[in-house]
Image (cartoon, rainbow, N blue to C red):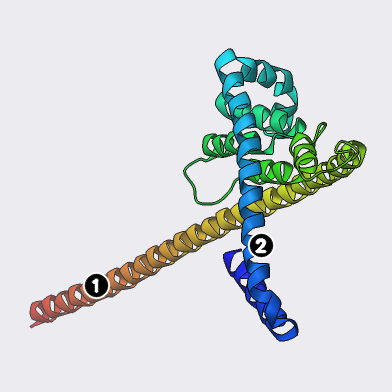
Amino acid sequence: MNIVFLVLSLVSLTFLTINSPEAVFPTMISGAFDAIELSIKLLAIYSVWLSVLKMMERTGVDKLVSRMLHPITKRLFKGESDDAYTAISLNFACNLLGMGGAATPAGIKAMEHMNKGDSTATPNMILLLVIAATSLQLIPATVIALRATAGSENAADIFFPTLIASGFSTTIGIILCKIFGSMSKSSAKSASELASASKSASKTNEFCKLDNLKSNKIGEFDTCSIKKINALNTKTTNLQRAKETQKKI
């Protein structure tokens, strides 16, 4: 993303320099002032919501929210620990109330609890990322606060459009995650079955080779023993003939 933003900035500055060279430095300075002003506003908003999150943790409200959302989180995220369910429920609650700044640390904590020590993301981690990105919001508090600070006459008029858009995007994201998750599980199962089949085939080939070696050794032993027996028979017959000739003489 840093490379993308750098390329966009360079392209924008190049076109601005070609079309209006006298506006380059004033635009850069005004953009820097706007960025600092927006950062201060966001800092104030996030400070409020993070303090609310900390108060929820101190008073035990997060546990209550976790118990309320536990049936939903347990159905969506199967096989996780209680700490992970608590963090996921808190992330959901913060997103529902539009507290994006408070939802981020809860989501990071949930990811840490869901991580099994592997570098690959699990299906539950991907699902949580999708739900956090779509951000189903009942009350878009952060956006309303930003609109109010920007001088909007009716900052809360985005309530229903935000609810419809976020609900639709979250539903589609969950459905797609479940579909692709089942596909990945079936492919992993078929791969494991193929690996086990190849292992059994290799073992069968090894057994066949051993049987062939054994049979060849037995065949070699039989031929050697037959030759020795024939040689002994010829010797005995020769000795008997020599004795008979000596008797006749």
Horizontally, is 117 left or right of 179 in the view? Answer: left
242 or 65, nearer to the observer? 65
Question: In the figure, is residue 249 to the left or right of 99?
Answer: left
Circle 1 sits in a helix, a strand or a loop, which is it? Answer: helix
**In the rendered image, is residue 79 in sight?**
no
- Residue type pointed to by label 2: Gly
- Give residue 22's quadrant in the image: bottom right
Closer to viewer: mark 1 or mark 2:
2
Per the image, the residue denoted by label 2 is: 31
Q: Residue at x 8, y 80 (%)?
A: 246
Residue that label 1 marks: 228
In the picture shown, does residue 216 fall above or below 112?
Answer: below
Residue 68 coordinates in the image, percent (x, y): 73, 18
User: Relative to the observer, which residue lies in front, 77 or 195?
Assistant: 77
Question: Where does the image place residue 207, in percent across and percent down from the top left?
Answer: 46, 59
- Residue at (68, 48) in percent of width and height: 185
Quarter holding residue 206: bottom left
Q: Residue at x 64, y 49 (%)?
A: 37
